[in-house]
Amino acid sequence: MADTTHSPTPAKGWKIDKAWVAIVLIPLVLAVFEPAEVWPMITFALTALMHTAPFILFAILAVAYLKSTGAENLLARAFAGREVRMIVLAALAGGLSPFCSCEVIPFIAALLAVGAPLSAVMAFWLSSPLMDPAMFAITAGTLGTGFAVAKTIAAVSIGLFGGFTVKATAKTVLFSDPLKNTPAKACCASSGCGAGSAADVYAGEVNWRFWQQADRRTTFRDTAFENLMFLGKWLLLAYMIEALMLRFIPADMVAQVLGGSGIGPILLAAIVGAPAYLNGYAAVPMVAALLEQGMSNGAAMSFVIAGGVSCIPAAVAVWALVKPRVFAAYLGLAVIGAIVAGLSWGAIA
């Protein structure tokens, strides 16, 4: 989380935070070209952020508690030697969890912060944004039960595919040191958050009543604050971008690009799905309209899979956590999974 983005050594001079700069510049630029859209965009972003707030706070407090008590070392050890089972459980849990592609970020950040294997995290990361109980009901009611079931199977399958791919290539350059400024094992990398030094003190020692020790209280406070600022800024930026997409990307333009039949639209839908996708719930009626306008069944499946995993709002938040090569692998796994899902559904439907 916050500790994954800070340098372990103090920065020289004043460093500009690009996320905050973008958050300030977006409404300023919008005010010049579309002043009437500034307030609706800000309102949308803040409302979405407030909706996500319970998930953010849970993840922040959970990680702060783990670090201040020293329990993150126990959690990290619990993952050892059980990677295959974790991948399967993560893919299954992700396919049923009620999180959108942005809401899942706090939990992914928490897992990465406490040392969960990247393979299991990737499995959950890929499958979680694609399906949940409410999404299943909406999809079944609008696009049919068959489409909803197929999307659920695709969500779990893509999670398994991503998880086991990462496991098989974990020792390669692609997935070594995946986090930006990777923290030390089972501890915080940031000297600023204080958890790095605390980890040496807490190693092998767990105190569930952390508030009884001043240094542990400091670790809890600093970790919680830095993670709050980190997740808050990136999710706010993600929702601002989503608001702009909802306003300025017309559905009929997407229909013109993705119409027709054959393998071409399926491949194109997987690529276009990322920038054109809005959010899981808004996408359902949009896809229904696109199907009526001539989109093939395979392209529709490819579009919702690729878009759900790699849409711009989610990608912004993912980019904040991992290094560019891991981010590229994440997008590549999503696109490959989307194409396979589209081809499979196109052959069945």
Image (cartoon, rainbow, N blue to C red):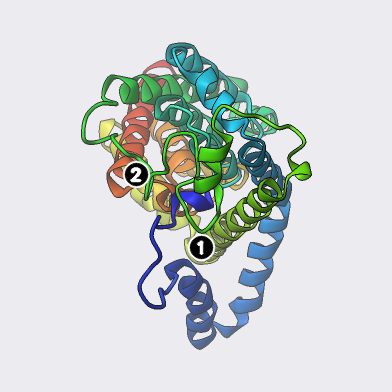
> Considering only order in the chain, which callout, 2 or 1, is on the residue closer to the N terminus?
1
Q: What number is the disc on residue 241?
A: 1
Q: Secondary structure at mark 2?
A: helix
Looking at the picture, how far across and down is residue 253, in whole percent? 41, 57
Contact between marks 1 and 2 (CB within 8 A): the answer is no
Residue 305 image-quadrant placement: top left
* Amino acid on which the number 2 mark rests in the picture: Phe
Give the side of residue 47 with respect to residue 115, left or right: right
Give the side of residue 306 with respect to residue 193, left or right: left
The residue nearer to you, when weighing 1 against 216, is 216
Residue at 64% across, 36% down: 66
Q: What number is the disc on residue 327?
A: 2
Residue at 49% across, 88% down: 32
| Residue 313 in sight | yes
Looking at the picture, how far across and down is residue 282, in whole percent? 60, 47
Q: Secondary structure at mark 1?
A: helix
Residue 280 image-quadrant placement: top right
The residue nearer to you, when weighing 267 against 240, is 240
